[in-house]
C-alpha cells in the first residue's frame, strides 16, 4: 500500500477500527500509549526508525534515507527526564516530506511544534533537552522500540486521538479491508440505536444469555461473530 492510498483509506478509519481488525486477522495488536501534541492530530506512514543517544545527529542521518510520507519513529527508551525532539527536528522532518514524528519519550517546544503543523506524538513534554551524550547503539537506524514493541521499516504507523498503532506493511491490505468492514457495521449499529433499536436487540443479547445458561463455553465474542456484530470485547 503506497502512501497516498494509506492516507486516503485511514482518513475514514480510526486506530480502534484497525486494532479490532488486527484481532480478526490474527495480527499482533501493537499499540503505544502516545498522545498527539496537537489534539485531533493524525498520521499514517512507513516507519523510519531512530534510536536516540543524546544527540540529534541520529535524526538527521535517518532523514537522509527517509522517503516522502514516512514517519520518524524516535526511541528514547520512554525516558521522562529529558526531551529528545524539539521544533528544529520537527521542522526538518517536515521539510524532508515526512508525514509526522512519533516519540517514545518526551518532546519540547510545544508551541512551536503546533505552529509547524506536522503531526507529532509523544509521551508528553518537558523543557529540558538531552542531558548528556550516550553510547550510540549499533542498530540505531535499524529499529526502534515504542512501548512493548520493536518496529522497523517493514511496519506502518497510524496515529490518532486514541494513540499509535503499528501494522506490518505486508498485512496492511487485509487489515484495512477488515477495518472498513468493522467501521461500516458499527455505523449501521449506531444508526439503528438512534432510530430506537437497542444494541441489545441488534446483537440478540437475550438469545446469548439464554444460550449461556445451557452452554457456558461460547463467549460473547463468539456470539457476535455469529450474528454479525462489530463490538470487540
Image (cartoon, grey):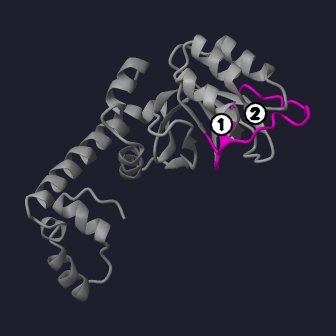
Name the residue rendered at 28%, 67% in the picture: 222
- 175 sits left or right of 128 in the view: left
Earlier residue among tags 1 and 2: 2
What's the CA distance linking mark 1 and mark 2? 8 Å
- Which residue in the structure is indicated by mark 2? 84
Residue 63 drawn above or below residue 7 = above
Residue 27 in percent (x, y) is at 45, 46
Q: Determine which quarter of the picture holds residue 82.
A: top right
The stretch of residues the image draws in magenta is 122-148
Q: Residue at x 40, y 23 (%)?
A: 1
Residue 15: where, in percent of width, then height?
A: 42, 43
Residue 191 is left or right of residue 109, and the answer is left
The answer to whether residue 220 is left or right of residue 154 is left
Quarter of the figure with residue 105: top right
Q: Is residue 94 above or below residue 172?
A: above
Residue placed farthest to the front in the image?
Answer: 111
Q: Which residue is mark 1?
A: 103
Amino acid at each position: 500500500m503506497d502512501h497516498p492510498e494509506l492516507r486516503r483509506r485511514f482518513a475514514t478509519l480510526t486506530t480502534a477500527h484497525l486494532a479490532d481488525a488486527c484481532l480478526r486477522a490474527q495480527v499482533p495488536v501493537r499499540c503505544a500509549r502516545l498522545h498527539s501534541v496537537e489534539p485531533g492530530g493524525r498520521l499514517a506512514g512507513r516507519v523510519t526508525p531512530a534510536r536516540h543517544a543524546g544527540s540529534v545527529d541520529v535524526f538527521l542521518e535517518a532523514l537522509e534515507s527517509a522517503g516522502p510520507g514516512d514517519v520518524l519513529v524516535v526511541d528514547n527508551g520512554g525516558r521522562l527526564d529529558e526531551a529528545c525532539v524539539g521544533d528544529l527536528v520537527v521542522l526538518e522532518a517536515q521539510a524532508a516530506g515526512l508525514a509526522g514524528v512519533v516519540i517514545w519519550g518526551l518532546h519540547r517546544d510545544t508551541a512551536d511544534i503546533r505552529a509547524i503543523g506536522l503531526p507529532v506524538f509523544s509521551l508528553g513534554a518537558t523543557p529540558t533537552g538531552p542531558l548528556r551524550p550516550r553510547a550510540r547503539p549499533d542498530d540505531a537506524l535499524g529499529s526502534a522500540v515504542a512501548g512493548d514493541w520493536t518496529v522497523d521499516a517493514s511496519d506502518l504507523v497510524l496515529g490518532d486521538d486514541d494513540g499509535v498503532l503499528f501494522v506490518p506493511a505486508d498485512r496492511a491490505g487485509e487489515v484495512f479491508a477488515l477495518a472498513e468492514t468493522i467501521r461500516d457495521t458499527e455505523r449501521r449499529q449506531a444508526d439503528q440505536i438512534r432510530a430506537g433499536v437497542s444494541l441489545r436487540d441488534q446483537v440478540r443479547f437475550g438469545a446469548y444469555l439464554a444460550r449461556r445458561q445451557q452452554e457456558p463455553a461460547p463467549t460473547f465474542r463468539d456470539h457476535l461473530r455469529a450474528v454479525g456484530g462489530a463490538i470487540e470485547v
